[in-house]
Amino acid sequence: MSYTELTVWTRGIIMDKEGRDIVNSVSASARREGKHAQAMENYVDNPDRTNAPTRKYCRISDEVLENELTYENEHPNIVVLVEGTMVKGWDYMRGMPPGGTLIINTHYSPEYMLRFVPGPERLAQLVCVDAAHLAHHKWLYYRLGELGLDRLSTEGAAERSKLIAPDIAAPLIAAVVKSTGIVKMETILPMIANKNAFEMALSEMKIMQFNPVAV
Amino acid sequence: MPTATAAKKKTVRINGCVASAQAAKYADVDVIAAYPIRPYTATMMALAQMVANGELDAEYIVADSEHSQLSIAHGASSSGARVFTGSSGVGVQFAYELYSPISGSRMPVQMMIADRTLDPPGDFGSEHTDALSTRDMGWLMGWACDAQEAFDNHLIAYRIGEDKRVLLPQMVCQDGFFVSHITTDVELPDSGQVREFLPPYKHPYPLDPRHPVSHGPQIMPEQGPPLQLERARAMEDSMAVIEEVHKEFGEIFGRHYDPWLEEYKTDDAEVVFFLQGGHGVTARFAIQHMREKGLKVGMVRLRTIRPYPTDRVCEVLSKFKVVGVIETNMALGSPASGGALYADACAALYEAPERPLVISFMAGMGGEAIVLKEFYWMTEKMIQAQKRGKIEKRTHWVGFEE
């Protein structure tokens, strides 16, 4: 039986939708491929607060999900940090089984970022993708204070909410799919609004491979 | 046989909160009285969006508290409107004064409950204590175990509550998180089917200046007994209507619910779980696994707790050797010194010629998920009691004992 947990760490309000888009699109793609999958937010994170760390979960299995009603992903195989500075400060690697994948939105290299990762020996690969740059949102996503102010307004929210991955979620989803093969590229790509950023990420992402461990 | 309009059905992926909002939309409610409290908030948000988008033509009133919220619901219902409201946890409690007047004036207000623990612990998880503490206030009450059932229960409850033989308010309950925030496939019916099942509501005696009537006037003590008897009779009489409406719902929509109890793998079961709500989903998986090991375990899930199906519970539960009541509610100092479901189940079983052993399990408190191994542990306790021929003790706190 194949069972995979994907946990996305993001920042409340300002990057909430970006995190949600990742788990929702991966989960929907898995279901289209005939698997059992669910996506949800970390229940106790809501209502989220600006900049506060929040989690989004996805579970994919060949068989019916018997743990559908449990609150958290206890053993995430794949972890995504939607905002690069989240690499420090808490243990997002908690519970990760050997052979895991960590994906960080950052312009730094995996070699540089590795030093901040708690328990890196569990990783099979560390992936860095400069999502803000690829999605042409460089100035906004690099300055969290300004992003917070921008998202105080509801201007543009209705338009953003209609699309899946119109901005930095697109390259992050590309990194998840390319590095792990969790779903097929052709299943997920049609859902993604920012196809340009998605496709650029496929060639631009930096993957640092370790000794893969059989899961 | 598919109906002519069946093609217009569609399946969407939504959680319990949105399913409830969708049900209110399909029921074409006239007035929505809202006040935010998690997890119910997601329902009022979804409804606000529907009203703003012009999908639903309803008065959307945001109250300044739950007490006002239910007062608005009461007043709106008196004017003859179909009313939808909802709350969670301590919000349900803050409106407490209104529950008896609403049922006393026979207003079929509908209230969605997404359970949340009371304080303490006041966390966001689900305990049924919020709604159960109002269970004797004259409201029809029952729990769904998934979003589809929640959707269906809303339509069914309106139809029962608005029936002229009943005219009672309804609490349509679902677990916070386990139902309210778990996204599943939900089949939304064709709106023509809903109109067939649930025609527009017409209160027999609405407040109307052209035809003056009094609602809820001050009365003298001697007028009390007949008034209370009428309300008690309405609750009793609702039982026949509940059965009738569920049958009709099955015929129109193709989903056939037993109005009172879901029995899961009970044919040859010797020990059963007796519970209500979302934990029934995990219980089914646990039972499948234990059956593979040859254990004769099953589940009886209570779907309607008010009116309480006393005869049916007696008939069904008396077939087994041991009944393990999974409470997910607090009834401090109650007969089992645990939860409230035990007392009702035992009262129902009292007249049975052969009674099973009954154990109360305090599980899922604070809204913790009841996981497979806890179901295994509880089954083991029931099997031990069966072998011994008596219970070890009335109430077990799951997770605190060996």
Image (cartoon, helix red, strand yellow):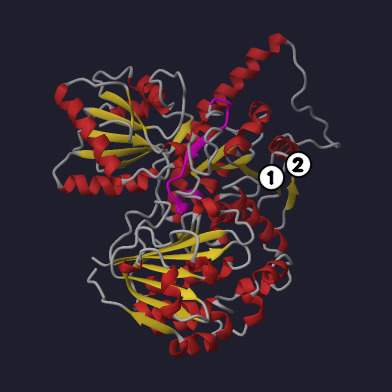
Q: Disc 2: which chain?
A: B
**Which quadrant of the structure image shows residue B137?**
top right
Which residue range is magenta in the image?
Answer: B136-151
Question: What label sits on residue A54 in the rendered view?
Answer: none
The quadrant where residue B315 appears: top left
Answer with the quarter of the image where residue B63 lies: top right
Query: Mark 1, chain letter?
Result: B
Give B226 or A2, whichever is nearer the viewer.
Answer: A2
The residue lying at 55 percent from left, 75 percent from top is A164
Q: Is residue B41 above or below residue B360?
A: below
Query: Height in image: B119 above or below A176?
Result: above
Q: Is residue B145 magenta?
A: yes
**Residue B292, horizontal then vertical, whole percent:** 16, 49
Which residue matches tag 1? Answer: B35
Identity, as a three-letter code, of the amino acid under mark 1: Tyr
Q: Is residue B10 visible?
A: no
In this view, A108 is above or below B387: below
Q: Which residue is mark 2?
A: B64
Q: Are dots 2 and 1 in contact, CB under 8 Å?
A: yes
Residue B234 in picture, x, y percent from top left: 57, 27
